[in-house]
Image: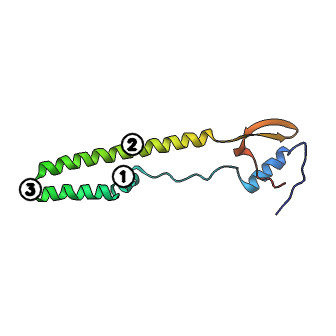
Amino acid sequence: MTTYRLNMTGLTSVEAKRLQAQYGKNELAQQKKESLLKKVFHIICEPMFLLLIVAAIIYFLLGEPRDGAIMLIFVVGIISIDVIQEWKTDKTLNALKDLSAPIAPLSVTARNNRLPALIWCQVIL
């Protein structure tokens, strides 16, 4: 483990770039986004939706296509609402993530700045 002496003048630009290259940016790892089809598949695989789809199929097999079609229309509608809600939730979480990015004081080459913490290097004092 490397230790650095506390320097009241801050890091030089060269040191900051070297440390950033060594340790990387101070940011959360990006999560892989799910595709729309994958989200729909996960929603359809919920037990309640499977039960409703099986019930609609049974209606068709019993010779009641009207009842089966009505049930499928409602199931598709509810699945659509769930997909829209998940999309809005993802959008909101991404907006909150952007808002929560910390701003911190930074002293590089004897100039005091306020920069996003994303730019900071990991320095062990």
* Sooner in the amino-acid sequence: mark 1 or mark 3: 1
- Residue of label 1: 40
Distance Cα–Cα, label 1 vs label 3: 29 Å
Q: Which amino acid does label 1 sit on?
A: Val
Q: Residue 84 carries which label?
A: 2
Q: Residue at x 27, y 49 (%)?
A: 75
Q: Which residue is drawn at 66% across and 49% down?
A: 27
Q: Is residue 55 left or right of residue 98?
A: left
* Sooner in the amino-acid sequence: mark 2 or mark 1: 1
Judge depth for marks 1 and 3 and give the one in front. Answer: 3
Q: Where is residue 48 in the image (x, y as percent from the top left)?
A: 31, 56
Q: Residue furthest bottom?
A: 1
Characterize the local packing of mark 3: few (<14), some (14-19) or many (20 or more) Cα atoms within 10 angstroms: few
* Sooner in the amino-acid sequence: mark 3 or mark 2: 3
Characterize the local packing of mark 1: few (<14), some (14-19) or many (20 or more) Cα atoms within 10 angstroms: some
Characterize the local packing of mark 2: few (<14), some (14-19) or many (20 or more) Cα atoms within 10 angstroms: few
Distance Cα–Cα, label 2 vs label 1: 10 Å
Q: Which mark is residue 66?
A: none
Position of residue 68 relative to residue 96, above or below, is below
Q: In this rendered view, identify the residue nearer to me: 24 or 78.
A: 78
Label 3: which secondary element: loop
- Residue of label 3: 63
